[in-house]
Amino acid sequence: SNAPSGGTVLVQGRDIHRVRTDERDRLAIHYHQSYQVRHFRSLYPNALMERAGSDYPVVHLFDEPQFNTQDGYIGFMLDFFRRLRGEGRLVFLCVHPNERFHLEILEEICERFIFVQKGTVTPIADYPSLIAHDACRAYLGDLLTERAA
């Protein structure tokens, strides 16, 4: 049950939940792990909803991408993130770091950070501020110790 409980999601000034379901990915696209299947139900027919007004996604959300250090996929993904940013796209990379190299990826590729814990969203300006944030340090635990080693 991924039904939103409140709030509004705006992309280029448009409420994404008022955009036709068959065009929402022209504003924002959610790349999730291939084994996850998500279904959303709209209470309104597409004919009564707004057009996306875009042919290509403005926001790209990568939800826990599978980074494998053995197959070159990381390099491909980092290049893809950079290309999207170069085209003026907003790239969100959502990770739950459980390997030291995840932190290295965050440090290399991310410009800003959002730390989310227990329903609280904390914007963080840069990587040094992220790993200095007490709640983040507690969450990362031994990964920070390994990183320093």
Image (cartoon, grey):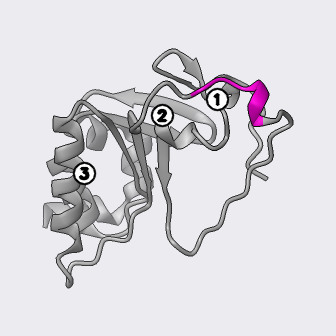
State the CA–CA distance, disc 3 to disc 2: 24 Å
Viewer-nearest residue: 97 or 21:
21
**Which mark's residue is nearer the viewer, 1 or 3?**
1
Can you tell which quarter of the image residue 16 is in? top right
Figure check: 101 above or below 28 = below
State the CA–CA distance, disc 1 to disc 3: 32 Å
Q: Amino acid at mark 1?
A: Val
Q: Position of residue 37 (x, y in %)?
A: 65, 67
Q: Is residue 59 found left or right of 13 in the rendered image?
A: left
Can you tell which quarter of the image residue 127 is in? top left
Work out which quarter of the rendered image holds the C terminus and state it.
Answer: bottom left
Residue segment shown in magenta:
46-51
Q: Secondary structure at mark 1?
A: loop
- Mark drawn on residue 36: none
User: Looking at the image, which residue sits at the far right?
Assistant: 43
Residue bearing the label numbered 1: 19
Q: Position of residue 52 (x, y in %)?
A: 54, 28
Residue bearing the label numbered 2: 27
Q: Secondary structure at mark 2?
A: loop
Figure check: 121 above or below 84 = above
Query: Badge 2: how crowded within 10 Å, few (<14), some, or many (20+)?
Result: many
Q: Residue at x 40, y 45 (%)?
A: 136
Q: Is residue 123 found left or right of 28 in the rendered image?
A: left
